[in-house]
Amino acid sequence: MTKVNMKVNISGVELKNPVMTASGTFGSGIEYGEFVDLNRLGAVVVKGIANTSWKGNASPRVAETFGGMLNSVGLQNPGVDEFIQKDIPFLRKYDTKIIVNIAGKTVEEYCEVVKKLATADIDLLELNISCPNVKEGGVSFGTDAKMVEYVTKQVKRVSKQPLIVKLTPNVTDIVEIAKGAEAGGADGLSLINTLLGMAIDIHKRKPVLANVVGGLSGPAIKPVAIRMVYQVAKAVGLPIIGMGGIMTGEDAIEFIQAGATGVAVGTANFINPTATMDVLEGIGKYMNQYGVEKISDIRGIIA
Ligand SMILES: Cc1cc2nc3c(=O)[nH]c(=O)nc-3n(C[C@H](O)[C@H](O)[C@H](O)COP(=O)(O)O)c2cc1C
């Protein structure tokens, strides 16, 4: 294989390649170390981190579905202090970028995490606005463009690293939401988070998940994700990290041609722990096959 140039720039940070992990599906990489050489990843996007530790939701909280899975893990995490102490030193041993996913139930909680991370040795922040906003009765922050603009602006005021806003697909008009994030000063966008879903155990006559509803992820959601990345890339100028059902290098190329700069692998890690490496190799193979010298040459080429 000829050497190809896979370097990408996300909000001013250069990554050796576009392949990263999707938040919540890879921890901080500690458990995956024996399958994946973390040095080969463009970036590790860690699980959602809140100001204090969260227990998450009751079990069962994951269920397999056709072409994907439902989860209602509920952003279980150890809190930002433990994360700074344990996970950052672990990840810094590797030659990869660190993207920290931020969770919160109020704007103040988001800001508290981001302030604590101001002096931490990390590269980028990814703000998960799919979290339920307790002050607004549990509605997700990310479903109202004005709210998205407001929360982005507030977090941006206290953030030291570039801020990527991660969008929820559970909206009527994703472009309007993306523009809200842009107006609030976002440096980049990630999309998509999980689609709200539900499954019923007809024998027990009960929902499969204890939480009743959960987030759908995996290959089943890929066409929705591709459509949203395509629409957003056409409407806003920010770099996009695309995700939703990426299993192979070809899937990743599809996101890049739709307009994504980076690609994140999520649910695939659960079925195939080396999925990120397979995606990386698949991208290289495609570039060789079609004589693509630089990955940016095929970004957003779909009219
Ligand atoms: C078990 C699980 C946990 C997740 N946790 C988070 C999280 O903490 N923060 C976040 O922004 N997204 C979280 N996500 C969403 C993923 O990062 C990703 O956006 C989504 O699953 C779509 O990608 P995929 O189809 O490749 O999994 C989670 C997804 C799964 C399946």
Image: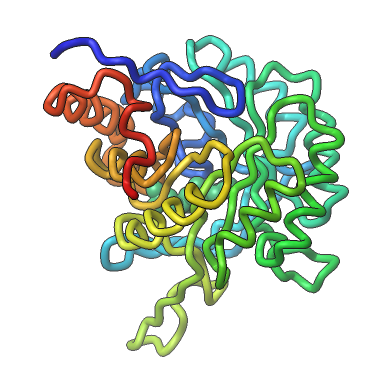
Quarter of the figure with residue 257: top left
| Relative to 147, residue 104 above or below | above
| In the foreground, 133 or 224 | 224
Quarter of the figure with residue 167: bottom right
In the image, residue 74 lies at what x, y percent? 61, 57
Q: Residue at x 64, y 28 (%)?
A: 124
The residue lying furthest to the front in this view is 303
| Relative to 198, residue 164 above or below | above
Quarter of the image with the N terminus is top left
Q: Residue at x 71, y 66 (%)?
A: 144
Q: Residue at x 54, y 52 (%)?
A: 235
| In the foreground, 211 or 196 | 196
112 with respect to 133 (left or right): right
In the image, residue 26 lies at what x, y percent? 46, 37
Q: Residue at x 27, y 33 (%)?
A: 279
In the image, residue 102 lies at what x, y percent? 68, 42
17 with respect to 95 (left or right): left
| Relative to 287, residue 227 above or below | below
| Relative to 34, residue 104 above or below | below
135 with respect to 303 (left or right): right
Can residue 110 be seen here? The reply is yes
Can residue 87 be seen here? The reply is no
